[in-house]
């Protein structure tokens, strides 16, 4: 990828990230941290490419670890975020809470 | 359509889904949808990657995904809500580790990339490795595997020296580019990993949420940089968006605690640095569960201030039952949450939500502080530092300047407390000695149960 194109992408992505978070109620900070943790789990895709191109056993071994860790980031990040957000409900929608 | 076009379109779709998903997660109404959208994006991107031209090692790849994804999925399903923060930390560390490992593969391939690409690969590797080892330490601390904050003599000098050495080795790798040696690569990664450990070791548990958030932003950046190295726009966009969002989130948290990020890293609140502050005057006055129940039952407004201690005791269901009983008796009940209650900002909201408390009964510090003087009772359960009035008045206190919940301004304050000790940060709490404050000793679970029984006995 050309250097300057990438620089523009970096810049726009940084502003997007900033904007997305800037008006978040405190109650969502933890789920959102967890959610953004899940999103960078896309590193799995990069790890797959790295392993896919690996030739020597050393490259394969490191690539394997990369995919393993990336998959754990994505899967774990999704499950914990989903579990946290599943619990949010408002007074109007639900009836009586737990009991 | 060529396979490559399908891959590129899928990455584009994934990037859009990630951003829309994150945006939706910023509101309680749409948050659930948001994570599902982001999840769809992840599946699309992952499946499409198998179509990338010129790839091999598919058996290894599928095995790694099955093992890594399977173990993480299972552990995420069984973890208790109180233990969420350390799980976020460890998954985040794994993402950082993955980014560092991608860089390592590129290094050992010895392909010529040009200086800019090598520089970003090295930077991503450094940040990713620090995030990995640092997050592991954060996990160990929050999980209780590592109780103490270890502080080397001259800690900051060690940090700076290690960081300097890592940067020097990294620079030499950039200069040699594709001719870098195995020794360089190995020593670079060892130094980076040790750096992450040394930075995180001295940081006390109370500051850990900010550190986890910081490492989350780090991992995002590392992923973004490695995305550039691989020429993969999905990684760049997702990584940098998270990097920026995570940085902002870290700042918000640090601000809520009145602890600038530089202070957290360089002057941790731990060991001898703690326990400052003037001696507290007065005495602690006890109250029984029956009197406490009566004070709340016959008041008109009660504000509950829950802390991590309540969640650890598993008392949130009992407390919510008590709140519902009070409401039936015509008492207005609100929950007041400090931004750093629990182990992460918003953690307490999650724990209350788990118990069934609707989020519109839960109020932030800014929303509720003006209401404390109107409340008949402020019930503090397992919270300590976040209601310590010394933060407003005592300049020598380590938490001076931290915004607190003004529970002390309520007509009466009841504090449910296990024993007479100081809080998580080890700081004496002036609130407990205040004239309008009564202490109700016992475990939160059992005390809340007694109070519920007494309120029931008083009838509607």
Image (cartoon, coloured by chain):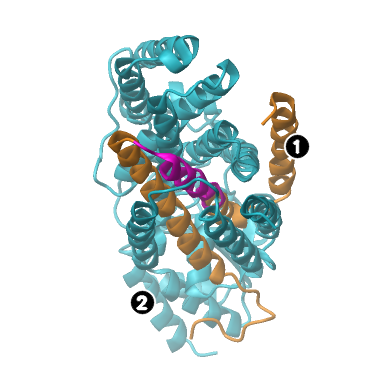
Q: Residue at x 57, y 57 (%)?
A: B48
Indicate the chain coloured orange by its letter: A
- The chain painted cyan is B
Q: How far, Cα to Cα, is label 2 from label 1?
A: 56 Å
User: Which residues make up the magenta segment?
Assistant: A38-55
Was residue A42 drawn as part of the magenta stretch in this picture? yes
Residue B445 counted in the magenta span = no
Q: Give the residue at mark 2.
A: B450
User: Badge 1 is on which residue?
Assistant: A12
Which residue is located at x 46 percent, y 82 percent? Answer: B455
Percent position of residue B293, x then y: 46, 74
Where residue B298 appears, as percent x and y from the top left, is: 56, 77
Q: Chain of mark 1?
A: A
> Label 1's element?
helix
Within 10 Å of disc 2 (Cα), the crowding (few <14, some 14-19, many 20+) is some
Residue farthest to the bottom? B459
Circle nearer the viewer, 2 or 1: 1
Q: Position of residue B396 (x, y in %)?
A: 48, 24
Nearer-the-camera pick, A21 or B111: B111
Is residue B25 visible from the viewing direction of this image? yes
Which chain letter matches label 2? B
Measuring 24% from the left and 45% from the top, which residue is drawn there? B145
């Amino acid at each position: 990828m050309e250097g300057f194109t990438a620089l523009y992408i970096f810049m726009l992505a940084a502003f997007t990230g900033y904007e997305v978070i800037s008006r978040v109620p405190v109650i969502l900070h933890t789920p959102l941290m967890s959610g953004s943790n899940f999103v960078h789990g896309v590193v799995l895709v990069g790890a797959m490419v790295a392993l896919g191109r690996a030739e020597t056993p050393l490259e394969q071994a490191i690539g394997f670890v990369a995919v393993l860790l990336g998959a754990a980031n994505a899967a774990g990040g999704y499950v914990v975020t989903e579990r946290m957000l599943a619990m949010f409900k408002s007074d109007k929608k639900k009836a009586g809470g737990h009991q | 359509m060529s396979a490559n076009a399908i891959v590129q379109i899928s990455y584009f779709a994934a990037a859009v889904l990630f951003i829309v998903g994150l945006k939706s997660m910023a509101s309680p109404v749409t948050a659930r949808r948001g994570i599902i959208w982001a999840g769809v994006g992840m599946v699309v991107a992952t499946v499409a990657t198998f179509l990338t031209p010129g790839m091999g090692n598919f058996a290894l790849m599928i095995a790694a995904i099955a093992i890594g994804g399977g173990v993480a999925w299972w552990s995420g399903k069984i973890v208790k809500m109180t233990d969420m923060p350390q799980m976020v930390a460890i998954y985040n560390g794994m993402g950082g580790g993955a980014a560092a490992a991608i860089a390592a593969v590129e290094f050992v391939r010895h392909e010529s990339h040009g200086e800019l690409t090598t520089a970003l690969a090295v930077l991503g590797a450094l940040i990713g490795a620090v995030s990995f080892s640092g997050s592991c330490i954060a996990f160990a601390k929050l999980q209780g595997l590592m109780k103490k904050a270890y502080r080397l003599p001259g800690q900051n000098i060690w940090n700076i020296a290690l960081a300097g050495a890592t940067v020097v080795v990294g620079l030499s790798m950039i200069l040699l580019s594709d001719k870098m040696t195995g020794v360089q690569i190995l020593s670079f990664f060892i130094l980076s990993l040790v750096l992450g450990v040394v930075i995180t070791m001295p940081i006390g548990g109370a500051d850990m949420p900010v550190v986890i958030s910081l490492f989350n932003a780090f991992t995002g950046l590392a992923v973004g940089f490695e995305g550039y190295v691989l020429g993969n726009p999905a990684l760049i966009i997702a990584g940098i968006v998270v990097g920026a969002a995570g940085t902002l989130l870290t700042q918000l948290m640090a601000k809520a605690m009145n602890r600038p990020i530089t202070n957290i890293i360089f002057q941790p609140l731990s060991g001898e640095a703690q326990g400052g502050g003037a001696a507290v005057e007065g005495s602690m006055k006890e109250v029984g569960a029956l009197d406490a129940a009566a004070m709340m039952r016959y008041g008109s407004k009660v504000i509950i201030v829950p802390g991590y201690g309540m969640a650890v005791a598993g008392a949130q269901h009992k407390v919510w039952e008590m709140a519902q009983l009070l409401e039936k008796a015509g008492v207005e009940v609100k929950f007041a949450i400090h931004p750093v209650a629990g182990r992460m900002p918003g953690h307490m909201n999650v724990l209350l939500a788990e118990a069934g408390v609707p989020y519109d009964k839960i109020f932030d510090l800014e929303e509720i502080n003006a209401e404390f003087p109107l409340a008949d009772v402020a019930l503090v359960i397992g919270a300590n530092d976040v209601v310590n009035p010394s933060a407003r008045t005592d300049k020598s206190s380590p938490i001076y300047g931290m915004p607190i919940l003004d529970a002390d301004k309520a007509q009466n304050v009841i504090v449910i407390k296990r024993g007479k000790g100081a809080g998580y940060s080890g700081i004496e709490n002036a609130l407990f000695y205040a004239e309008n404050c009564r202490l109700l000793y016992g475990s939160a679970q059992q005390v809340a149960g007694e109070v519920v029984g007494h309120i029931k006995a008083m009838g509607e």
